[in-house]
Amino acid sequence: MQLSVWAKPSFDERFNELAKMAGRLPAVKPLRQKQVELEEQLKQELAPRLYQILLNWEETLNYRNALEKEWMYLAGIKDGMKCLKGIQDFTSD
């Protein structure tokens, strides 16, 4: 099942809303603080060139993870739509 061209922006917007909400979860706050502390440690310990390489690696990792999560989110929507269609087909017979 293919999503309609008009539907994808709506689902993308909802995905972004959910991502923001997930970022505000209580369990995430201490992890974010830990990440800031570790980043500062790395900045102090690594040579600037190595630190920049690490930042580039992190950016690539984060982008890849975002793409994978978006794909899974859209796949879940498609699966849900298939289930709903199956139920509707079953009950309309």
Image (tube, helix red, strand yellow):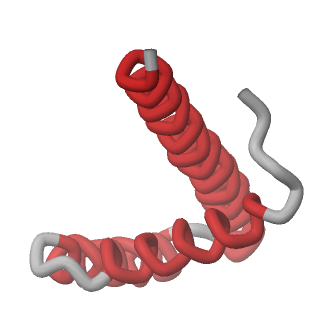
Q: What residue is shown at x 66% (from left), y 67% (from top)? A: 12
**Residue 31 appears in the picture as rendered:** yes
Residue 26 versus residue 71: which sits nearer the camera? 71
**Residue 53 appears in the picture as rendered:** no
User: How far across and how far down the image is residue 37, in percent?
Assistant: 30, 81
Q: What residue is shown at x 49% (from left), y 21% (from top)? A: 89
Question: For residue 93, which quarter of the picture?
Answer: top left
Q: Is residue 43 left or right of residue 51?
A: left
Question: For residue 91, which quarter of the picture?
Answer: top left
Image position of 18 with respect to 64: above or below = below
Residue 18 versus residue 59: which sits nearer the camera? 18
User: How far across and how far down the image is residue 86, in percent?
Assistant: 46, 21
Q: Is residue 47 left or right of residue 79?
A: right
User: How far across and how far down the image is residue 65, in percent?
Assistant: 57, 48
Residue 18 versus residue 78: which sits nearer the camera? 78
User: How far across and how far down the image is residue 82, in percent?
Assistant: 53, 27
Question: For residue 9, which quarter of the picture?
Answer: bottom right
Q: What residue is shown at x 75% (from left), y 59% (from top)? A: 8
Q: What residue is shown at x 67% (from left), y 71% (from top)? A: 10
Image position of 1 with respect to 74: above or below = above
Task: Give the position of the N terminus as an image quadrant.
Answer: top right
Q: Is residue 3 left or right of residue 87?
A: right
Q: Residue furthest front?
A: 93
